[in-house]
Image (cartoon, helix red, strand yellow):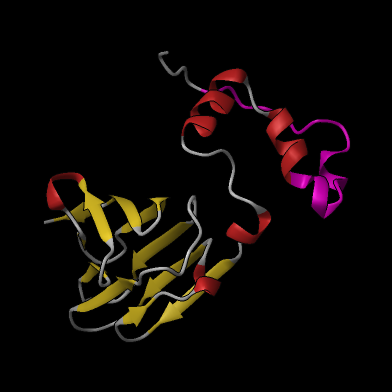
Amino acid sequence: MALQPLPDRKLPVGFANSAPQNYYADYWQSLDANTRALLASVGGLPSSSQLLGINPQTASYVLVLGDAGFTIEMNVAGANTLTFPPGVFPVKTFINFVQVGAGQTTLTPGLGVTLHGVGGALKTAGQWAMGTAYQRATDEWVAGGRLTV
């Protein structure tokens, strides 16, 4: 199926006042069929607990369960690592990351973790480079965005 450009869409009547437990169900219903099919192919919409905010870091960092759905800002002057530990996150977890500081961030798999990037690209491409990783199977992650080898 070829994806079509998405038209600007207005929220359904009452959507802005959705109760938190209905927010994602209401949002899902507001999407067109192409968008729903695309999202379903990668596990659907993230849950409300997966869209929480920003976690700023000033040194190399090992992810913890509470980081699920957060954007990890790596504000480090020198080279640093963002480590994906084993056995911590449920499958379908999404984590965003961004290199805020001058130091390049390398995505690093913990012991027993597999981390995939196109052509082995697992380093941020420069200051303000951003990406996303999602766990597609137990301890198996896929990373994409502005990454380099």
Image quadrant occupied by the N terminus: top left
Relative height, residue 138 to residue 62 (above, below): above
Q: Is residue 133 left or right of residue 107?
A: right
Q: Out of 48 and 71, give the one closest to the viewer.
A: 48
Residue at point 77%, 46% (across, down): 23
Majority secondary structure of magenta residues: loop
Please tell me how many numbered marks the rendered image carries: 0
Residue at point 24%, 69% (across, down): 108
Relative height, residue 117 to residue 75 (above, below): above
The single residue placed furthest to the top in the displayed view is 1
Q: Position of residue 13 (x, y in %)?
A: 86, 32
Relative height, residue 36 to residue 141 (above, below): above
Q: Position of residue 19 (x, y in %)?
A: 86, 51
Q: Quadrant of residue 33?
A: top right
Residues shaded magenta: 6-23
Q: Position of residue 75 (x, y in %)?
A: 34, 79
Q: Position of residue 7 (x, y in %)?
A: 58, 22
Magenta-span inclusion, residue 144: no
Image quadrant occupied by the C terminus: bottom left
Magenta-span inclusion, residue 20: yes
Residue at point 49%, 50% (across, down): 92
Residue at point 21%, 63% (across, down): 126
